[in-house]
Each structure stands twice: as structure tokens, then as C-alpha cells.
Image: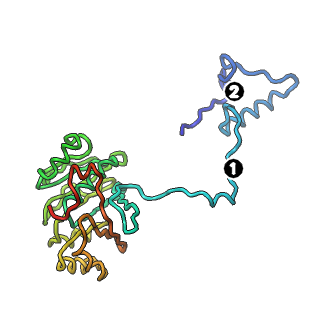
Amino acid sequence: MTAMTTRTADGPGSGYGAGYGTPGGARRPAAPGGDGDSVARRAAGLLRTGFGLLGPRHGRHVLSAEDLDTLALPIGDDGVVIGVDAEGQPAVLGLNRPTPYDVVLIGGLWTAQVLALRAAATGARVAVETGRAQAWTQMVHAMGGGQNGLAVYDVGRVPPQGASAGTPVLVVRDCGMRPPRGRVTSGPWQSVLTLLPYLSPVAPRLIRQARLVGVQRISPDEAGELGRTMALPRADMDSLPTLADGVTLWCADRDRQYVMTQPTDAEVGLLGTPRRMD
């Protein structure tokens, strides 16, 4: 909303009504027998309250206190829709944040690529650091050869991204079982998603540093080790080896949620159906 500009009554052609309905900004004469000083005071009062230009009169929008409770405003998180929860409600992951945000996904390349596609669709720039660039080539071509928000770099070659509130960035690290420490780390408006195909020796360190951890189907031994690392309930440990393709257990602090990622027709045409193995 632009601020209203008003003039003071100190210069030529200024004053109440100047430039509004009076050619040349001439002053309107006071009504015969009226008090000119009172008119000037009233004009100055209107200017101070922002009513320099008087437009058409409309009735005020008034809501009684009794009717206030009937309002229902749909307020919720914004971000990337990563699937649906157990109740069939959309599960949203807010990747664009003013604070550093690290995510670890122990799962398949398919899910990481869907997240990258959807993050780019929200306006974020996606930088993929990978040792298997050929696995991302089709996505890059489908998005205009890297001109529409997705670029692929070799491991250790991601340049500074210049993230800001207007141009948030998601860095996807697809660097295998033992990803090296990245040159580009998370920061304001720049989140980092590290993909691990399986539970590796570096996983505990990455999990401790992460704000969010996603786990797809893993072996019973891995589930037991991960359960001890993350203090998972026994029910979650037992469910991890049986998760279907496309299902991820997302864990943040003490919150846990199972999410089914359902691809769109365009995503199926580009990436295929959900799968854990690549």
C-alpha cells in the first residue's frame, strides 16, 4: 500500500483543496460570513489524519463480536507438498527458511528428484551436487537445460549460490554413501538435502546435524541401528523394513510422520513410478 502524500499550507498554491477541483491550485474562498481561521484549522486537521483528498463516502465494514467467531481463515505452513499423511491430508515441507536447514534422506534417488522438482516449482533454485550427473540429465533437459532453476555440478564444485529471500536455494547432495563435507553449506534461505542410499558410517554425524530426517525402507539390521541412534519407538523400528515404495518416515525432534509421495502424471512421465532402488 502506497502512502498518501500531503502538502503543507506554507507555499503558493497549497492548502486544502489545492490541485483538487480548483484550477491552478487556487484557494477556495471562505463562505460569506464564515470564519477563515476555522476553515484553515479544519483543513490542517484533515491533512494530519491523512484525509487530504475527500472521495466518495461508503459505509464502514463492521463485524460484531458475536459474528467474529464464525470466521475461518485457512492459515497453514507453506512450502513443498511432499505427499499425504496417514489421514490423506497434504504433508508440506517448508524448505525456504530464513535460518539454516539441513535435511537427510536415507532413501532412493526417485524421492530426492521429486523433492527437487517440486522445490523448483515453488520458485527455489536447485543446485545438485552429484557423482552421477547422468541420472539427473533428463531432469535438467526437461527444465530447459538448467535455465529454469535446476543446475547440476560435480562433487565439490558447487559455487556460492547467493541465496536470498527473493531467490531461495535448495542444495541436493547426491554424493554416495560417504559424502565429503560440502563447500556450500546451509544458511539463511539456503537448505541442504543430503541423500544417503543406505545407512552408512557417516550417517550418525549427518543425522545429529540435521533438522529433519527422512527414512525409507531399510534392512532390519539398519532399522535397529537407526532406532538406537534416533531413539525411535519399537513400532517404528519394526515398520521400517516393510515400508512400501514411495513411503517415508519423516522425523524432526520428537515428531514423526509417515508420508506417501504420490507423483503427478508429469512426474511419472519424467521419473517413472515410485521406487526405493535405483
Name the one closer to the observer, 77 or 249.
Answer: 249
Residue 18 at what x, y percent from top left? 67, 24
Which tag, 2 or 1, sits closer to the chain's start? 2
Residue 237 at what x, y percent from top left? 26, 79
Q: Which residue is mark 1?
A: 62
| Pointer 2 local density, CA inside 10 Å: few below 14, some 14–19, many at least 20 | many
Q: Quadrant of residue 248?
A: bottom left
Q: Quadrant of residue 103?
A: bottom left
Which type of secondary structure does the marked residue at label 1 adopt?
loop
- Residue at (37, 66) in percent of width and height: 85
Q: Is residue 95 left or right of residue 108?
A: right
Callouts 2 and 1 close, C-beta under 8 Å: no
Establish if 190 lies above or below 234.
Answer: above
Quarter holding the N terminus?
Answer: top right
Quarter holding the C terminus?
Answer: bottom left
- Residue at (67, 32) in percent of width and height: 52
Which type of secondary structure does the marked residue at label 2 adopt?
loop
Q: Quadrant of residue 243?
A: bottom left
Q: Which residue is mark 2?
A: 15
For the view shown, which residue lies furthest in the bottom direction?
Answer: 234
Label 2, label 1: how many angstroms apart (C-alpha)?
A: 33 Å
Establish if 256 lies above or below 115.
Answer: below
Name the one closer to the observer, 235 or 53.
Answer: 235
Residue 86 at what x, y percent from top left? 37, 69
| Amino acid carrying mark 2 in the image | Gly
Establish if 144 lies above or below 160.
Answer: above
Residue 77 at what x, y percent from top left? 42, 58
| Amino acid carrying mark 1 in the image | Val
Name the one closer to the observer, 145 or 163.
Answer: 145
Name the one closer to the observer, 33 or 125.
Answer: 125
Q: Is residue 126 left or right of residue 177?
A: right
